[in-house]
Amino acid sequence: MTPRLQAMREAVRLRRHAGVRQTTVPDVAGECDREDLGWMQRVARLFIRQCQAERPVIEADQRIVFTRTLPAVPAIYAADAWPRQFAGGRAHELGPISNICADWGLVLGQGLQGRRAAARRRREHCANEPETAAFLDSATACIEALLELVGRYAEAATQAGRADLAERLRRVPAEPPETFHDALQALRILHASVWLCGHYHVGLGRFDQYMLPYLERDLTAGRLSIGAAEDLLAEFFISLNRDSDLYPGVQQGDNGQSLMLGGVDRAGRSAVNVLTHMVLRVAGDVNMIDPKINLRVDRDTDLGLLERAAELTKKGLGFPQYSNDDVVIPGLLAHGYRVEDARDYTVAACWEYIIPGRGMDVVNIGAVSFPAAVDQAIRTGLDAGDTFPAILARVRQCIGQQTRERVAEYRHLILPPAPWYSVLMSDCIERGQDLSKGAQYNNFGIHGAGSANAADALTAVKRFVFDEARVQPRLLTAALAYDWKGFEEVREIMASGPRVGNNEEDADTMLRFLFDAFADACESIADNGRGGCVRPGSGSAMYYVWLARGHAGMREPAVGATADGRHQGDFFSSSLAPAPGTRSHGPLSVLQSFATLNYRRICNGGPITLELSDAVFRDRESIGKVAQLVRQFARLGCQQLQLNTLNAETLRAAKAHPELHRNLIVRVWGWSGYFCELGAEYQDHVIARHMHGI
């Protein structure tokens, strides 16, 4: 990167931009109360007032502008009135729509003036549709509010003597971009603006697809060189980090700024292009936590592209995360997605699959705790004198019950109106229907958490309690009750069995049983209450910590000691990974274990997670080995892969002396963050993860 960009990156890491932030936000709730506005009008008023209150910030070295100056999103209802909006149903997470992806290509292609014209055309035909009229009027008001804010940015650029920037801002995002620079500037404003009215985890979708025409046009016309384009792209990536401390998440960095590369287009043709490679190169140069990079691959993906991606893995950023088109697309088709849309998939905040512009899927309505189901079945079943098949029946029953409970909790989901987000979706304006009422796809996604520990526990019980009778049933239940204290020999036996991740049939059979039971439970629910299905996933998100140690608001209590030899309070593995402490035979055996799952049925995403020792990358040959590992992942038929590069000694040093390691980045689960900004429990889990060599 150039010295200008290096200085810009350092300024963002030091959060110097915080100095321009205001100390107050508009009193939107009071204003709305005085005017007795409805919910739709309140959300629109929020966006309008936020745009009006923003102060343009243009620094001398910036070529792509927009910096949040408002420190928070104000309430639109008084504290006691907000819960009443969800009477008779429930909210999702913080309330506002989140964790989806706009149709950025559509909005860039039409410009905001084009979207406003579409709203006005639809408005002409809804004289007898007051709800539709209210929505379209609110959407139009939001468009005009953002255009007014951009106009003030253009005026500020003029006053700063930046005629080139002022001219660009007068064109975009009002009009379709003419250049790659235009498109990046428009996207920065459009993307950042979504957060102004409370939406969060705002994905960037298939970036190398919708941005490619603008880059190609410039390269063909000779207006831009590859180097100049990379400088612009680097500045755009840096800008995504400028406001990320304002974005809500479980931890700093959990902000959902994910983008997707590669794969096939809607017609099924290879979509890898010059921008695919450019994004991978530039993300490595920028070396920051945003954007989170995802790469779509298949069994025949070019090794050169995989080697380029491995160079990025070497950086230790925890991305790219890989998705296998050969598996993901058939899985989406099996769950009712049209073939063109299935080919167009991206990811939400972490790994869950969603369709840009067309998906109002709620991809995280909670988790099914496999360890809780297995532990309950083992303790109850052994005390009752069950056979092993009877214990499996108990597991299946508990998984079904948890699944039904998760869906029942969301059967009457209420989503707040989203007039501005609706502008950015594929056909909300054209249908005259707010996004909160649904889109083309309205499915739910549930995580299946703690699968390796649960499968290992079942395997150990089958072998040592039933097949070999080395441990008496009541001795095991007593050992579990006492967290193995005084039962060390029993624990040693139970911990010595076959393990998921070592390509051992006994353990992998139990793993398949758990996910098949989970898929059966989801498929038994014909309608989730929003006209969609329920998609089971193999990810765990934060549940690998919460299910082990408890968390406020969770239905299932923390799981105590488990029959695989795990102590109470020890973490489960994140997503698809061997249980902590497993003596792994190597990364290939891990892939082989998880390749046995039926991913056509398990299509809410959830990666196989492998931690690579940084020693892997000490010679050039290692890049090729990592690329071959990714190819093997695809050819084995696995669904999703996350490769993280770690050095345990460095992590321990960073925990002891954070001031010396403020730029150290790690992958936490489906996102990357600065290690020293994480809570201690997440730091400890990252340090304890098993690291593979190749």
Image (cartoon, rainbow, N blue to C red):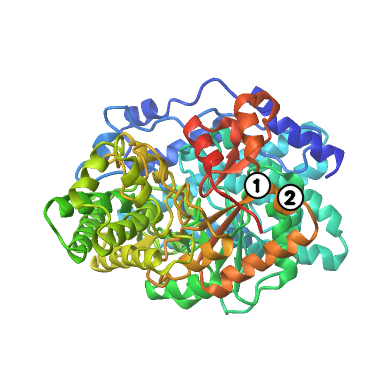
The quadrant holding residue 656 is: top right
- Residue 145 position within the rendered picture, expressed as x and y whole percent measured from the top left: 54, 41
- Residue 328 falls left or right of residue 459: right
Residue 214 in view, yes or no: no
Q: Which residue lies furthest to the top in this view?
A: 23
Instruction: Determine contact: label 1, label 2, CB under 8 Å.
Output: yes
Q: Quadrant of the N terminus?
A: top right
Q: In which quarter of the image is the C terminus?
A: bottom right
Q: What element carries label 2?
A: helix
The quadrant holding residue 596 is: bottom left
Q: Is mark 1 on a helix, strand or loop?
A: loop
Task: Please give the residue where the numbered disc 1 appears in the rendered image.
Answer: 317
Residue drawn at the location 57% of the way across and 68% of the way down = 633
- Residue 182 position within the rendered picture, expressed as x and y whole percent measured from the top left: 73, 53
Task: Please give the residue where the numbered disc 2 appears in the rendered image.
Answer: 284
Q: Residue furthest left?
A: 384
- Residue 99 position within the rendered picture, expressed as x and y whole percent measured from the top left: 46, 50
